[in-house]
Amino acid sequence: MSKEQKIKDSQGFHVLIAAAGSGVRAGFDIPKQYKSLCGKPVLRHTLEKFMGLQGVKSIRVVVGEDHLPLYNAAVEGLALCPPVLGAGTRKESVYNGLCSYTVAEQDDIVLIHDAARPFVSRKAIDALFESMETSCAATLACTSADTLVTQGYKALDRNAVHAVQTPQAFRIGALKAAHEKFKHDDSFTDDAGLLAAMGEEIVLIPSSRDNFKITTNDDFIMAEKLMSSSMQTRTGFGYDVHAFDPAPATHIRLAGVDIPHNKKLLGHSDADVVLHALTDALLGTIGEGDIGQLFPPSDMQWKNADSALFLAEALKRVHARGGQIVNIDISLIAEEPKIGPHRAAMQSRLAQLVGLPASRVGLKATTSEGLGFVGERKGIEAKAIVSILFPADME
Ligand code: MG
């Protein structure tokens, strides 16, 4: 690892998403950031761009108080800081967000980003963060392909004019001070403008026009098209078997839940056959081997390990490549224990572990009608399939 990389890793950055607007220009029945785009709220798409990204220290969202139920549904299962309540304007809302950082975090870097820009690229985020090694403020910006003219048809130099986007990067304390200085000035439409008015140089990081802000219904239609063409769906399959331990037991662990039962499964780890199949399915989407390669039974550190650790590692690898899990589906083949009474708890635990709403977590159980090793009550089988959206340009 290079020295620069080490410095970057140790510093990292916070992410503050401005999502308190009511999105009145789009004319939707709910604020645009909560509207479903290709099956998921816009805000969730935006947040997932930052999830698992190297250097992210924390992610928090500024939300409108009236939108809290929409917010909670949109972010279910995501690891975020508690939301911050917004105010009457974007500027005041961002300020509320800045006030939520501790005194010790004032020199940290924060990336302020609009909830309605779900197409920000991870490459652009990296470039923005890297620019903060040598600057005090930076923003993504793009040039125009169109000829730009003033009201009197005076052409502007296209290369001298930029459309400013987000994320924008700052030191928390410096941006907060700028907000306080211009508290009563409503002419600012972005945060970099405040720092520029303080005399700071704003570094412009070239960005794609794809990183547009969804504002109107037309933008929404364009976003649907772009979203569906900018992702590839990959499917992964996992299979696992564990034999019953002949020794008597008090419970058996399945899908991360300890179910009272007089038999448990044999295994080097906690022998959670469901989580093992699911972990292999996830790894299958990125061609990164299987659970046995990553966590060999010969390694004593995995003795009696909680299989949630294996699942977390596979998820980390999927998220690091920008993967967004669409759904998981699992079949458990067992004569015993009876799964029915525990199915809801297992489904809920899986949803929590994977970061999905329960409606995207399939969990079915069947017997094998007395046939084979399962029918002879020698062990349990689990099969898992996952569907994951990855960036279309991922190898
Ligand atoms: Mg196993």
Image (spheres, rainbow, N blue to C red):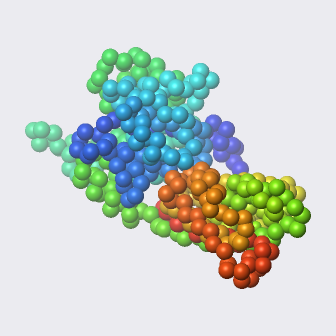
Res. 385 visible in picture:
yes
Question: Where in the figure is residue 67, as x and y percent of width and height?
Answer: 38, 37
Identify whether 373 is placed above or below 102: below
State the residue in front, 124 or 308.
Answer: 308
Identify whether 207 is placed above or below 92: below
Question: Where in the figure is residue 90, as x and y percent of width and height?
Answer: 35, 30
Residue 378 placement, left or right of 100: right
Res. 395 visible in picture:
no
Residue at the spot 26% in from the left edge and 46% down from the top edge = 28
Outermost residue to the left: 152
The quadrant where ligand 1 appears is bottom right
Outermost residue to the bottom: 371
Residue at the spot 44% in from the left edge and 33% down from the top edge = 62
Number of numbered tags placed on the structure image: 0
Identify whether 242 is placed above or below 325: below
Residue at the spot 55% in from the left edge and 70% down from the top edge = 235
**Residue 65 lies in quadrant:** top left
Residue at the spot 81% in from the left edge and 71% down from the top edge = 243
Residue 204 placement, left or right of 256: left
Question: Where in the figure is residue 196, as x and y percent of width and height?
Answer: 39, 27
State the residue in front, 188 or 103.
Answer: 103
Residue 197 placement, left or right of 380: left
Identify whether 13 is placed above or below 77: above
**Residue 108 lies in quadrant:** top right
State the residue in front, 53 or 38.
Answer: 38
Question: Where in the figure is residue 345, as x and y percent of width and height?
Answer: 62, 53
Quarter holding the C terminus is: bottom right
